[in-house]
Image: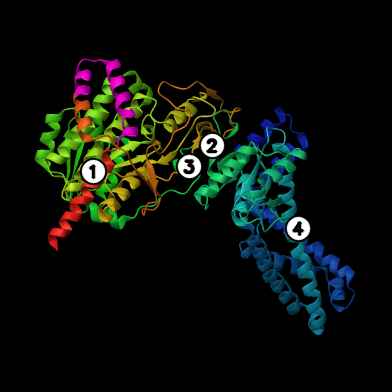
Amino acid sequence: MPDSNFDEMAESRKKIADGAPLWAVLLHELLTRPTGFPGRTRFVALMMIDGALILSTMLLVVLAIPGPISAAFHGRPSLIALFCLTALFTISLTGLYWRSWRFLSFGDCIAISTAVGVGMAAGWSACLIISSKIRGAPFDALGFALLHSALLLVAMISARTLRRGLREMARSRLMLTGDRHDILLLGELEWIRSLLELLRADPANRFDVVGALTFDGRETRLQVAGVPVLGSPEKLPEIVEALTVRGRKPESLVIRGNPAMPRRAFSHLVTLADKCDLTVARADDLHKNEEGEPRIQIKHFELADLLGRPEVSLDRNSVDRLIRSRRILVTGAGGTIGGELVRQIASFKPAEIVLLDHSEFNLYTIEMQARDLFPDVICRPELCSIRERSALDDVFSRHQPEIVFHAAALKHVPLVEGNPCAGAHTNVLGTRNVADAVCAHGALAMIQVSTDKAVNPVGIMGATKRLGELYCQALDLIGQCDPDSPRFMTVRFGNVLGSSGSLVPLLQQQMAAGKPLTVTHPDIERYFMTVGEAVQLILQSSARAMEAMIDRGTIFVLDMGEPIKIVDIARRMIRLAGLRPDIDVPIEFVGLRPGEKLYEELFDATEEQTRSTIPGVIEAMPCPVPLEKLVAAFSELSHLIAACDEDGVRDLMKELLRAPAQSTWVKTLREMTREIDVIGKAANE
């Protein structure tokens, strides 16, 4: 007997101990056992059943329809035996008895119809040869044969349908004795039907489908395999409410493994499910855990599913013109943003990429990835810290990069808050070192990666990033008088989903460990984007700025839509993992961390927003600090860092950040530039 049948029977017997009715267990075993018989015994058993059906339907038609054909069979019982044996033997030759009755389908019904037709033709042909009475009434024989064939076909299909129906009824009664998990399905009707068949064929299944949803909701009031179609996802709250009144509130909404839904629609669906207290699971997540309980597997979902908006797409043509055949340097190349920059830049075939990082392991990892994914691109790993001015200058001298992407930074808010000297050393003086090397070695452009925490900063990390922005803006603006001077561009964006040390990996680790998810405050909210989007913004804005000669000093900010509450991200992650917030996974509020704000901003109060020609990007015109003041202040900052004077570092940065509000330096600089342009035009005329 096949192992599957042993498993099913063992499962049935176990149900007796779980309180299942004895009749259901016995009926299930009885109707399961025949498929486990040896082939010959099973073959004979099925032929005997069909032989009885052929004989009984023949006798019924003979008794019901008097005439010459009935008289021919009345006078010769051996003729009936000949008919039955011939028909049965012919049916057996069609292979009908090697089909399983347990899984009767439309294709099986077609096969039965064909077998009955062939068998009846053979049986009646034998009777025509033997009986002269039947040959003498051909039209009566034709009508008699058609009626008998139709009756036999109905009887054979009904017998098989009855067997499957009784077995499924017994199985459903066994399932009701354990824990039942009511679910809703969402998808196309064909997929819903297929999944229902898979669930019903699994003897260990505990999922009970209480309804189905379709994307357009047109098939409402229909049924698929006995399950009602209730509407579209937009009506989910009303559907769940109606099912709750009937005592069938679902626990989960199950969709296809790869839902053919736009990301915004999928995010809206998760929001609706959250309001209805439903988990959102994919069909391939249904399984049993080690204790045998049916659960939804925690899976690595797409991080972009958390955004609630479409991802930004990349204009590859302009980026290709910026990168192709040029020497590129990426600082912080081993980090999340730096590594993605390397991978995307390498796809545009630069002349070479210089990978600069102070972490040996991170540098080794990104170099191996780059060489493996892009074997034709030259990669030059440089183990160097941007704090070391002379070492950084040596790297620039040897490689002469044309475009520099500056992603190296300390970004963890509490750590930088507790170590202000280290934060200022890397984020302020390190940025100054990179920018000065760009000027000294004649690079075309430097693109600085910044953060929304640099806007109206309350913590040390945001303050250090803001000072780095101010220095690059000042260098960019001072170059207005010289068209050949390098461009310094700042790209600002919000939290990056999935970056090292960020929110989502922490929540994923907590969820995988079975711990509560920790959120600092119920009202805290942030702007979010994926790492792919962040890098696309960096590449696209810098490329378009270089081509369109966008005004110097401009800051580029991704249009990230509306900010999202952190607690909503946590709840959405739990739902996407197929679990229930506050029930399966609790959420704990632990208080704001040092240097953390409830709300992030994208623009400083002194910055003027302008419309951008770059899709998905907003531009801002700054009110910067004069370069001379920054140079002097950074020199003083260097002495304070060397002396480990944390209070002095904090005070100096606060003083510098108050300066832009009173600064008129940029206006004076632009007036000087316009006067130079006028003088130049007059000289040419």
Left or right: where 362 falls relative to 414: left
Q: Residue at x 16, y 59 (%)?
A: 682
- Tell me if I can see residue 358 in this picture: no
Q: Kindly identify the amino acid type of the residue bearing the numbered disc 3.
A: Leu
- For residue 572, the mark is 2
Q: Kindly identify the amino acid type of the residue bearing the numbered disc 1.
A: Leu
Left or right: where 161 falls relative to 548: right
Return the disc, 3 or 1, that comes first in the chain's sequence: 3
Residue bearing mark 3: 307
Left or right: where 556 falls relative to 525: left
- For residue 669, the mark is 1
Q: What is the chief secondary structure element of the magenta stretch?
A: helix
For marks 4 and 2, give the CA distance. Answer: 49 Å
Q: How crowded is mark 2: few (under 14 residues within 10 Å), some or many (20 or more)?
A: many
Q: Are marks 3 and 4 in contact (CB under 8 Å)?
A: no
Q: Kindly identify the amino acid type of the residue bearing the numbered disc 2.
A: Arg
For marks 3 and 2, give the CA distance. Answer: 10 Å
Which of the two discs, 4 and 2, sits closer to the camera? 2
Residue 242 x %, y %? 74, 43
Q: Which residue is drawn at 43% across and 31% down?
A: 503
Query: Splitting the image into 4 quarters, where does residue 88 fall?
Result: bottom right
Residue bearing mark 4: 158
- Secondary structure under the numbered disc 3 in the rendered image: loop
Which of the two discs, 3 and 4, sits closer to the camera? 3
Q: Which image quadrant: the C terminus?
A: bottom left
- Magenta segment: does it hold 643? yes
Residue 345 x %, y %? 26, 48
Q: What stretch is highlighted in magenta?
A: 636-663
